[in-house]
Structure formats: C-alpha cells, structure tokens
C-alpha cells in the first residue's frame, strides 16, 4: 500500500509529459516542426537497451521524432564521435545523447565532450556542468535525474529556500549536480559520501534528503528528522526468489520505516525514475524551441 505521504513520481511525470505533448502540438501547427532526439547506443547491455527503448517510446508519446544509432561493442572511439558529430549537424535533431556506460576501451570524457553543448540534453558536457557550478552563469541544460528531483520537490509544494538539504552521493550524474541545483534554489547543502563517518547524525539534521548512493535500504527511519522530505534516487536490484525474474528493485531508503517519519517521500519504483525521462523530453523541447525561435506567451 502506498503511504498517503508518497510523492507520486509516475503521476507527476505523466503531467509533465502531457504539458510537453500539448506544446509539441502547438509547435507543429505553428511552424510544422517537432523536436527530435537522437540516441547513440554502444554494445548490447540489457539495461542500456531497456533505457534506450523507453526513451524512444517516450518520444513517441509526446510527438517527438527519435533517431537511434546502435553501434557494436567493438566500435572505435572515432566511429562513436562521428555518429555524434552527424547528429550535431542535423537540423532536425535538437538533443543528442550517448547512452552510458560505454565499453572500457572508449574514453567517455572524449565522447561526452563531442556532443554539441546546444544539444547536450543529458547535461553531461563539462561546459554545462561548469556553468551550473558558477555564480551568474546558466547552463543550457541540467542533467535529467537531479532536475527531476528538484521538479518533484517544486511540484509537491516543498519549500527549498532556506532549508538544510543533505545529498548522499557525489557522482557526476546525480549527487554533484543535485547539490548544485539545491544550492541554486537557496538551500544550505551538505554532501556526504562513502568516506563520511557520521552519516546518520548528518541526515538527521536535514529538512530535505536526496539519497543517491546505490546502497539498498541504507537510509533508515532513525536517520531522518521527523517531517523531512525524502527523495530516493536509488535503483538497486536485490534477489527476490518470490518474484518472476528472481529480483526486485529497491531504493536507497528503507521506505517502510522512512514513510512513518518523513512528511513526504518518493517510492521506488515510481518516484524519481519516471521523472528522469520526462526531464529529458523537457530539455529536448527547450532545445527545439531555442533552435526554432518558438516561444509562446
Ligand atoms: P555512483 O556509484 O556513481 O555514486 C554513488 C555515490 O554514493 C558516490 O559518491 C559514493 O561515494 C556514494 N556512496 C556509496 N556508498 C555509500 C555509503 N555506504 N555511504 C555514503 N555514500 C556512499 O552512483 P550514481 O550516482 O550513478 O547512482 C546512485 C544511485 O542512483 C544508483 O542506485 C543508481 O542506480 C541510481 N540512479 C537512478 C537514476 C534514476 O533515473 N532514478 C539515474 C541514475 C542513477 P564515493 O564518491 O566516495 O565513492
């Protein structure tokens, strides 16, 4: 049973997608164009294939064109970069992303750096990350998972300004940009990681906790200040002999305990996950609007 204080990420993501689809409809009737998203997939990791398929399906849902290139595991770095550069130059493409992780022989930094910052809808280009970190600068795009976390907070009426937020994890894709975004929203932010000794004490001070460590059930009820808002980014597969495929997906938060202490909390699945793709669509729409000079008022 979902607790009554659950933040329904699935419903909020649907709402975002509905808004995007409406805007795409208006764009199509006004200028005869729609946004286009290009995805480069390398190799045949099952999880990556699943993510790419859901991105494709999401594009269809909101009326975007999607362009997909699948390259074999054995591809050279040069060939991946060439695929990216072709999309960079394609006027029908407004977002270009390379599905990570890449095979070990490929330099991720070079590939990610080859995406045009105007089409960097994943927000992974160092130029966009750098601008996110700097005062008085604005990134063109912010990476989708942390952006989704903030969107969940805002759409759930959570006040961020003046609050103390603890972010668990400091990765390039989630923790670090989440901390920067919270700071931009005028929260006071503590970032904790695997070398932080007194995690529970620190999280107990937080009005807002964003958990992105990749450790199942880590955040217990006793780690939370009563009334805290908890955003669980974790996607962890744990063995479950009772389930059809032998595993189950759980977050970084021990939901059954935490939902009794938190004022609002995201479930896993159905919390941050659906928002990530919704934010990817949102970034791609923004990019297309910029490219076409299409702005409504
Ligand atoms: P990484 O493994 O790249 O980073 C994990 C971070 O958590 C690191 O900073 C690490 O510290 C820290 N950490 C690890 N263990 C502990 C611990 N025991 N105590 C405190 N800190 C710890 O993971 P990602 O950031 O890529 O992803 C985090 C989680 O979010 C994963 O479960 C992933 O599956 C999920 N995820 C979900 C997405 C979604 O769409 N919902 C999208 C992306 C990720 P250190 O830096 O010291 O190593």
Image: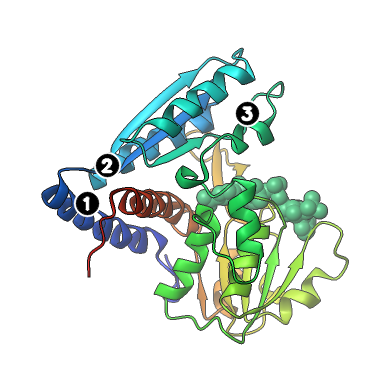
Q: Residue at x 62, y 15 (%)?
A: 76
Position above or below: 279 against 35: below
Q: Tag 1, which secondary structure?
A: helix
Residue 11 shown left or right of residue 225 in the figure: left
Q: Which residue is mark 2?
A: 64
Residue denoted by label 3: 102
- Closest to the camera, between mark 1 and mark 3, is 1
Residue 115, percent across and down?
Answer: 53, 37
Q: Name the disc covering residue 24, or none.
A: 1
Between marks 1 and 3, how big is the CA–CA gap? Answer: 32 Å
The answer to whether the residue labelled 1 contacts the one labelled 2, judged by CB atoms less than 8 Å apart, is yes
Q: In the image, is residue 122 above or below residue 229?
A: above
- The kind of secondary structure element at disc 2 is loop
Residue 98 placement (x, y as % from top left) = 52, 33
Residue 120: horizontal and vertical position, in percent?
Answer: 50, 45
Compare residues 251 and 48 and report the one nearer the observer: 48
Q: Quadrant of residue 36?
A: top left
Picture residue at 26% right of the left edge, 39% below the top: 60
- Pointer 1 local density, CA inside 10 Å: few below 14, some 14–19, many at least 20: many
CA–CA distance in space, label 1 to label 2? 8 Å
């Amino acid at each position: 049973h979902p607790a009554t204080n659950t933040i329904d990420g699935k419903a909020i993501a649907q709402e975002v997608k509905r808004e995007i689809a409406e805007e795409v409809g208006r764009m199509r009737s006004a200028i005869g164009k729609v946004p286009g998203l290009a995805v480069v997939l390398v190799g045949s990791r099952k999880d990556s294939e699943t993510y790419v398929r859901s991105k494709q399906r999401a594009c269809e849902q909101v009326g975007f064109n999607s362009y997909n290139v699948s390259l074999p595991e054995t591809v050279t770095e040069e060939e991946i970069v060439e695929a990216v550069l072709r999309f960079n130059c394609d006027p029908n493409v407004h977002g270009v992303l390379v599905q990570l992780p890449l095979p070990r022989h490929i330099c991720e930094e070079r590939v990610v750096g080859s995406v045009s910052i105007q089409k960097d809808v994943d927000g992974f280009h160092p130029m966009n990350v750098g601008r996110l970190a700097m005062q008085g600068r604005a990134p063109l795009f912010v990476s989708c998972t942390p952006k989704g976390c903030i969107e969940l907070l805002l759409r759930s009426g959570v006040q961020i300004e003046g609050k103390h937020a603890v972010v668990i994890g400091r990765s390039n894709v989630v923790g670090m940009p989440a901390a920067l975004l919270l700071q931009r929203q005028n929260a006071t932010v503590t970032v904790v990681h695997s070398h932080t000794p007194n995690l529970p004490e620190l999280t107990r001070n937080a009005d807002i906790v964003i958990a992105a460590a990749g450790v199942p059930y880590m955040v217990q009820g006793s780690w939370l200040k009563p009334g805290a808002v908890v955003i669980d980014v974790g996607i962890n597969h744990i063995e479950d002999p009772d389930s059809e495929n032998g595993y189950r997906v759980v977050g970084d938060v021990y939901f059954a305990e935490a939902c009794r202490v938190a004022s609002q909390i995201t479930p896993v699945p159905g919390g941050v996950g659906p928002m990530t793709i919704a934010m990817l669509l949102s970034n791609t729409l923004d990019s297309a609007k910029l490219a076409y000079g299409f702005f409504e008022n």
